[in-house]
Image: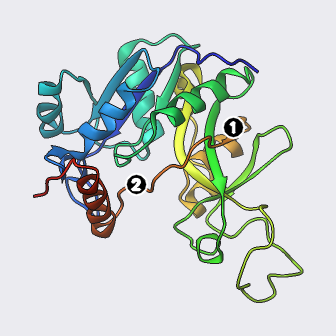
Amino acid sequence: MADVTPQFMAVVPARFGSSRLPGKPLLNIAGEPMVAHVWRRACQSQASRVVVATDDMRIRDAMLPYGAEVVMTRDDHPSGTDRLAEVAELLGLSGDTLVVNVQGDEPLIPPALIDQVALRLADDPEAAMATLAEPIADVETLFNPNVVKVVRALQGRALYFSRAPIPWDREHFKTQPNLLETDAWLRHIGIYAYRASFLAAYQDLPPSGLEQLEQLEQLRALQHGFAIQVALANTVNPAGVDTQEDLERVRALLAEQGEGGSL
């Protein structure tokens, strides 16, 4: 396994529309739009290039004063992976370019995780994608359908992703348990690294049945036979912003760190 971070670029997809938090990328956190926090953390990684990909001129206009490179994309992409595929095409990336998708609602993401997921993909030349996971320690998280679980092969490749509590403990899950006795369960962390050649192929793949059932875009890749490497995160990844409660939590945390500010 290589011990030097490979050359890669980071893309921060920032979609203005959000059913729960409209205009989410521009929400104020410590005096700056949320997408600016994500972009800055991506810039603190080893990425050789960081791009914000958006479908809205308001996000572009907010990021240009920071000196960010912004790529305008269509507004009809069904997933973040589809949006990155358009970015790769617009930028004319070579097929072997490694591209890390840093989701635009992760203002606290550690730069080390961005580097780690790129390294994981570089270490497996036959994998199309790489992502990260962390152990699940409590029953509530395991049985929460909003938390995506992943099961890995011994070599680290993903066997399946699900909103269900997998693997199912046939002996002890006859009723919902009070505690977990092993570390068999993994929570998927939604950061991805791709090869640009895979992104070109992905946008031509028809949506898969499993993807539509679970509403998980990575299942399209798995069901069409592409390999996904999954590494155990080397540092804690704070939760992203999906709800107003999440937003207030992040605001409070940054305020405690002396980066105060609110609406």
Viewed as shown, does residue 64 lie left or right of 234?
A: left
What secondary structure is marked by label 1?
strand
Q: Residue furthest bottom?
A: 175
What residue is shown at x 70% (from left), y 46% (from top)?
223
Q: Is residue 60 above or below residue 17?
A: above
Q: What amino acid is found at the position of numbered circle 2 in the picture?
A: Gly
Residue 203 seen in render: no
Residue 221: x and y in percent read 64, 40
The quarter of the rendered structure image containing the N terminus is top right
Q: Quadrant of residue 12?
A: top left
Indicate which disc residue 228 carries: 1
Residue 240: x and y in percent read 40, 54
Distance in Å between CA atoms under marks 2 and 1: 22 Å
Residue 146 seen in render: yes
Residue on which the image places disc 2: 240
Viewed as shown, does residue 224 lie left or right of 58?
A: right
